[in-house]
Image (spheres, rainbow, N blue to C red):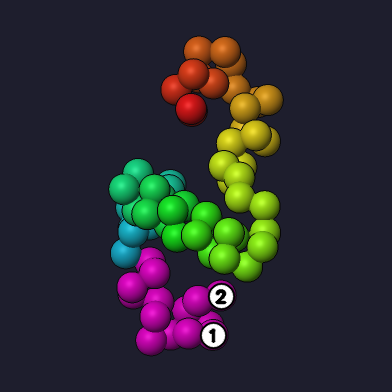
Amino acid sequence: MVEACFPHLAARYGAPYEGRSGVPRAYARALSARIKKLQARFGFPVNEGMVDRYGRRLAPAQQELAL
């Protein structure tokens, strides 16, 4: 979608994902912090993203690591 609609941004947004199934933890933390600020600023509930959804699927030992 980024490539099709915003080709000038494709390299910038693709770099954190290159050769990975996800983004680096530091990038994810920074993005999460930015989203929480926007949630608070615009009156959306501030939460921990998808952690509540993933927690039910993880084994107990993995749940501790996810927190």
Q: Quadrant of residue 59?
A: top right
In the rendered view, does 3 fall on the left or right side of 23? Answer: right
Real-space CA distance between mark 2 and mark 1, rounded to the nearest whole angstrom: 6 Å
Determine the residue positioned at 48% across, 85% down. 6
Determine the residue positioned at 59% across, 36% down. 51
Dots 2, 1 in contact, CB < 8 A = yes
In the rendered view, does 31 fall on the left or right side of 52? Answer: left
* Disc 1: which residue: 5
The three-letter amino acid code for the residue at tag 1 is Cys
Magenta residues? 1-14
Residue 32 visible here: yes
Marker count (numbered) = 2
| Residue 16 is covered by the magenta coloring | no
| Residue 13 is covered by the magenta coloring | yes
56 or 39, which is in the foreground?
39
In the rendered view, does 16 fall on the left or right side of 2? Answer: left
- State the image coordinates of residue 17 (x, y, percent, origin top left): 38, 57
Dominant secondary structure of the residues highlighted in magenta in the image: helix
Query: Which of the image's four quarters has the N terminus?
Result: bottom right
* Disc 2: which residue: 1
Judging from the image, what secondary structure is the residue with disc 1 in?
helix
Query: How dense is the environment of label 1, judged by Cα within 10 Å: few (below 14), some, or many (20 and up)?
Result: few
Query: How dense is the environment of label 2, judged by Cα within 10 Å: few (below 14), some, or many (20 and up)?
Result: few
Determine the residue positioned at 45% across, 60% down. 34
Q: Quadrant of residue 13?
A: bottom left
Numbered label attached to residue 29: none
- State the image coordinates of residue 25 (x, y, percent, origin top left): 35, 44
Residue 24 visible here: no
The three-letter amino acid code for the residue at tag 2 is Met
